[in-house]
Amino acid sequence: MNMPDTSSDLIAVLTGDLVKSTEMDAATIDDVREVISVAVAQAMEWPGPGIVGPEFYRGDAWQLAVTQPHGFLRLATWIKAKLAASESRARTRIAIGLGTVEALDRKAVSRSLGEAFVLSGRLLESMGRTQDMDVALPVQREDLYWLPAVVSACDVIVARWTRSQAEVASLFLIPDAPSQLEAANALNRHRQSVNRVYHDAGVFALLALITAAERALMQPYGSVHGSGKATK
């Protein structure tokens, strides 16, 4: 029998469902699931972020956990970028819950228990159809009040990409990203076209937002909360 991990540390839980899945046939949904699975498998090769899942359920829904929560935003935008670059150009909503975990089941992540899972699930139910990505914070992390705005900004940037732009932009989401020249060579494109995507499609701004979130989440909680002010 699989014994779940237990911990009180902060984790991130990503719960998603496919947008307009009722308009997709079974083969298309299977293809979209495969894109998500491959994207996550590729992200598992990155340093960190400690991914458990994804698990797919209810046809169009999926869930995974990130045990090193500073990596959640890069992973979420990576998944969205890979979907945008795929043939179906499918979209997924992603509700991120940051919180503690009571039991983390590595074989069936949806059977896990804890604050992060509750926050993620409730957020997905409340998001409606006007927003594709958001984050719910635990009460003890009030210092991260700005994070939902950053997550929304990242989602807006990715949502505007064409398929061609997403193919280019996704390369720069890798932690050890290539240079623009290397990206152009890998994609068999002119360097100028890659540079246009980097600037005109907002990739530079997206990376700045992701980096800011990662740095904040890697700081010990007390270093930004103990005195009510961020340390310098």
Image (cartoon, grey):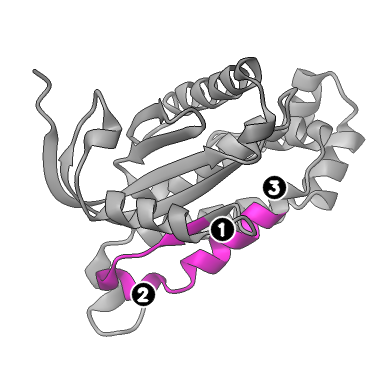
Question: On the rendered structure, is 151 left or right of 143?
Answer: right
Q: Find residue 128 and name its label.
A: 1
Coordinates of residue 16 in the picture (x, y in percent) = 48, 41
**Residue 61 part of the magenta-drawn span:** no
- The image quarter containing residue 92 is top right
Q: Which residue is mark 2?
A: 143
Does residue 197 lie above or below 2 as drawn?
below
> What segment carries the magenta color?
134-156
Judged by depth in the image, the label closer to the viewer, 2 or 1, is: 1
Check disc 3 and give the amino acid type: Val
Q: Provide the secondary structure element on which disc 3 rests.
A: helix
Q: Residues within 10 Å of mark 1 (few under 14, many from 20)?
A: few
- The image quarter containing residue 52 is top left
Disc tally is 3
Main SS, magenta region, reads helix
Q: Quadrant of the C terminus?
A: bottom left
Label 3 – label 2 distance at C-alpha = 26 Å
* Of callouts 3 and 2, the N-terminal one: 2
Residue sitting farthest toward the front: 22
Q: Provide the secondary structure element on which disc 1 rests.
A: loop
Q: Residues within 10 Å of mark 3 (few under 14, many from 20)?
A: many
